Image: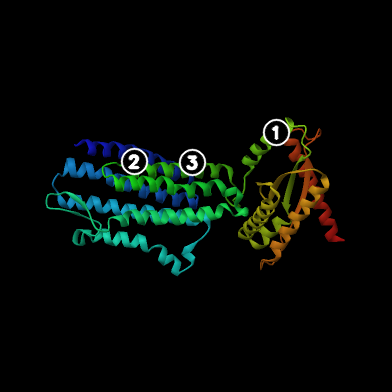
C-alpha cells in the first residue's frame, strides 16, 4: 500500500468510527423523533460515502488489484453516496427550518434535480465517462463533469445555509437560534474541505470536513432535545430551571438594578374540555398556538418563555413595576385570543395568568414558582366567576 493510500485508509477509518458512533447514538436515543430519523439518514449516507472511500483502498489495492469492474462499482457507490449526502441533508434542514418544499409541487421537483443528475450521470459513467472512468490499466480518471459531485452537495449546503441565515433574523424563532446557526455554518466545514481535495488530489479532506460539520450539528441537536419542548419548540422545564438559577445569582449580586425579576405562570382555560370534546390533536394545536403567541410576545419584550408542563407555560421577564407586568399579562392574553379568533376552530383558546416577583418572600426559585402558580389559580377562579355572572 502506497503512502497516499495509507493516509486515505487511516483518515477514513477514523471518520468512519466517529460516524458510526454518532449514528448509533442518534438512532437508539432519539429514534422516536422525526428530525432525528432524518439526521440518521444524513449520517448513514456519510457513512456509506466514507466506507466506499475506504473500500476503494481495500478493494483496488489489496483484495482485487487490477479488477476494473470492482473499481467501477466502488466509485459508483462513492459518487451516489455523495449525492445522497446532499439530498438527505436538504430533507433534514427542510424539516428543521419549516420550509416544507415537498408540499409545493414544482419546487419539490426542481430541488431534486441536482441529486438525480449526479446519480444518473454516475451510473452511466462506465459508458459515457461523464463523472469518472477507469482506463485499461485500471487507473481512475476524473470525467469532464466530475465537478458535478462537488456542486451537487454544495448546492444543497448553500441553499440550506441561506435559509438558516434568513431564519436567524426571524424574531419569532429565538428558541431555535443555535440550531439555525449550526445549519448555516455547515457550509464552511464542507465547502472548504471539498475545495482542498478537489484542488489538491491526494489529501482526504472531504470526509474530515463532513465529519466535523455533522458532529457540530449533532451536538446542537442533542442540546436542543435536552432544552426544548418537542411539541411546542420552546424552552422546556429543565431549561427554565437552569435559566432561573442563573437569573437569581445575577439579581442577588446586583443590588443596584432598578428592575425586578418577575415570573408569570399561564394556564390554558378549559384545556381538559378541549381534549375531551375535540381530541388530543386539537389539544396539541391549542398548546402550539399558545407557544407561537408567546414567541411573538417574547420577540418584542425580550422575555424568556417556557412550557412548564401539561397546559402550563412560564414567562420570565424584568420589569420596573407591577403595573408594567400587569400590562404584559394583558398583552399575552390578547395575543393568544387574537390568534384563536384567526383560526377556524369551534372552540376559543384563552389563558389565565398569575405572576410573582423575586423578593424577600420569594427568595428561592421554588418559592417564586409556587407564588406565581397560586396567583394564576386566583385569576382562573376570577375568570370563571366573571363568565358565570
Residue at disc 2, secondary structure: helix
Ranked by sequence position, the earlier of labels 1 and 2 is 2
Q: Quadrant of the C terminus?
A: bottom right
Q: Badge 1 local density, few (<14 within 10 Å), some, or many (20+)?
A: few
Question: In the drawing, what numbered circle is on residue 93?
Answer: none
Q: CA distance from mark 1 to mark 2?
A: 44 Å
On screen, residue 190 versus residue 127, left or right, reads right
Ranked by sequence position, the earlier of labels 1 and 3 is 3
Please determine whether, in this image, residue 144 is positioned above or below residue 234: below
The answer to which image quadrant residue 189 occupies is: top left
Residue 168 or 297: which is nearer the viewer? 168
Residue at disc 1, secondary structure: helix
* Percent of width and height locating residue 63: 17, 42
**Residue on which disc 1 sits:** 250
Task: Count every numbered label the image shows and give the total.
Answer: 3
Q: CA distance from mark 3 to mark 2?
A: 18 Å
Q: Residue at x 25, y 54 (%)?
A: 76
Q: Nearer the viewer, mark 1 or mark 2?
A: 1
Q: Residue at x 73, y 34 (%)?
A: 251
**Residue on which disc 3 sits:** 219
Q: Quadrant of the N terminus?
A: top left
Ranked by sequence position, the earlier of labels 3 and 2 is 2
**Residue on which disc 2 sits:** 16
Residue 199 or 254: which is nearer the viewer? 199
* Percent of width and height locating residue 146: 27, 55
Q: Residue at x 36, y 50 (%)?
A: 45
Q: Residue furthest front?
A: 199
Q: Badge 3 local density, few (<14 within 10 Å), some, or many (20+)?
A: some
The answer to which image quadrant residue 15 occupies is: top left
Q: CA distance from mark 1 to mark 3?
A: 28 Å
* Percent of width and height locating residue 123: 25, 59
Q: Nearer the viewer, mark 1 or mark 3?
A: 1
Amino acid at each position: 500500500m502506497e503512502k497516499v493510500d495509507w493516509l486515505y485508509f487511516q483518515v477514513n477509518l477514523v471518520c468512519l468510527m466517529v460516524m458510526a458512533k454518532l449514528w448509533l447514538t442518534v438512532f437508539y436515543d432519539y429514534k422516536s423523533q422525526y428530525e432525528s430519523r432524518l439526521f440518521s439518514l444524513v449520517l448513514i449516507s456519510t457513512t456509506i460515502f466514507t466506507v466506499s472511500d475506504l473500500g476503494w483502498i481495500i478493494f483496488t489495492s489489496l483484495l482485487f488489484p487490477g479488477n476494473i469492474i470492482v473499481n467501477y462499482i466502488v466509485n459508483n457507490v462513492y459518487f451516489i453516496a455523495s449525492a445522497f449526502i446532499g439530498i438527505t441533508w436538504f430533507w433534514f434542514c427542510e424539516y428543521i427550518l419549516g420550509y416544507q418544499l415537498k408540499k409545493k409541487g414544482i419546487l419539490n421537483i426542481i430541488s431534486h434535480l441536482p441529486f438525480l443528475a449526479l446519480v444518473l450521470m454516475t451510473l452511466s459513467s462506465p459508458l459515457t465517462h461523464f463523472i469518472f472512468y477507469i482506463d485499461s490499466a485500471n487507473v481512475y480518471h476524473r470525467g469532464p463533469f466530475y465537478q458535478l459531485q462537488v456542486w451537487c452537495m454544495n448546492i444543497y449546503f448553500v441553499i440550506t445555509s441561506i435559509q438558516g441565515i434568513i431564519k436567524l433574523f426571524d424574531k419569532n424563532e429565538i428558541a431555535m437560534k443555535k440550531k439555525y446557526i449550526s445549519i448555516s455554518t455547515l457550509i464552511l466545514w464542507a465547502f472548504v474541505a471539498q475545495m482542498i481535495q478537489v484542488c489538491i488530489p491526494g489529501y482526504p479532506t472531504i470526509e474530515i470536513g463532513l465529519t466535523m460539520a455533522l458532529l457540530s450539528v449533532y451536538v446542537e441537536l442533542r442540546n436542543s432535545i435536552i432544552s426544548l419542548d418537542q411539541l411546542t419548540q420552546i424552552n422546556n422545564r429543565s431549561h427554565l430551571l437552569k435559566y432561573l438559577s442563573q437569573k437569581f445569582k445575577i439579581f442577588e449580586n446586583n443590588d443596584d438594578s432598578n428592575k425586578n425579576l418577575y415570573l408569570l405562570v399561564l394556564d390554558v382555560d378549559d384545556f381538559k374540555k378541549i381534549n375531551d370534546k375535540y381530541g388530543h390533536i386539537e389539544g396539541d394545536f391549542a398548546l402550539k398556538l399558545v407557544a407561537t403567541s408567546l414567541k411573538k410576545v417574547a420577540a418584542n419584550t425580550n422575555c424568556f418563555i417556557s412550557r412548564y408542563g401539561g397546559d402550563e407555560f412560564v414567562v420570565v421577564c424584568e420589569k420596573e413595576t407591577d403595573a408594567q407586568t400587569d400590562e404584559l399579562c394583558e398583552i399575552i392574553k390578547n395575543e393568544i385570543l387574537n390568534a384563536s379568533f384567526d383560526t377556524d376552530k369551534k372552540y376559543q383558546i384563552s389563558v389565565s395568568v398569575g405572576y410573582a416577583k423575586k423578593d424577600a418572600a420569594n427568595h428561592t426559585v421554588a418559592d417564586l414558582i409556587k407564588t406565581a402558580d397560586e396567583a394564576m389559580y386566583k385569576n382562573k377562579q376570577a375568570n370563571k366567576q366573571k363568565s358565570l355572572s
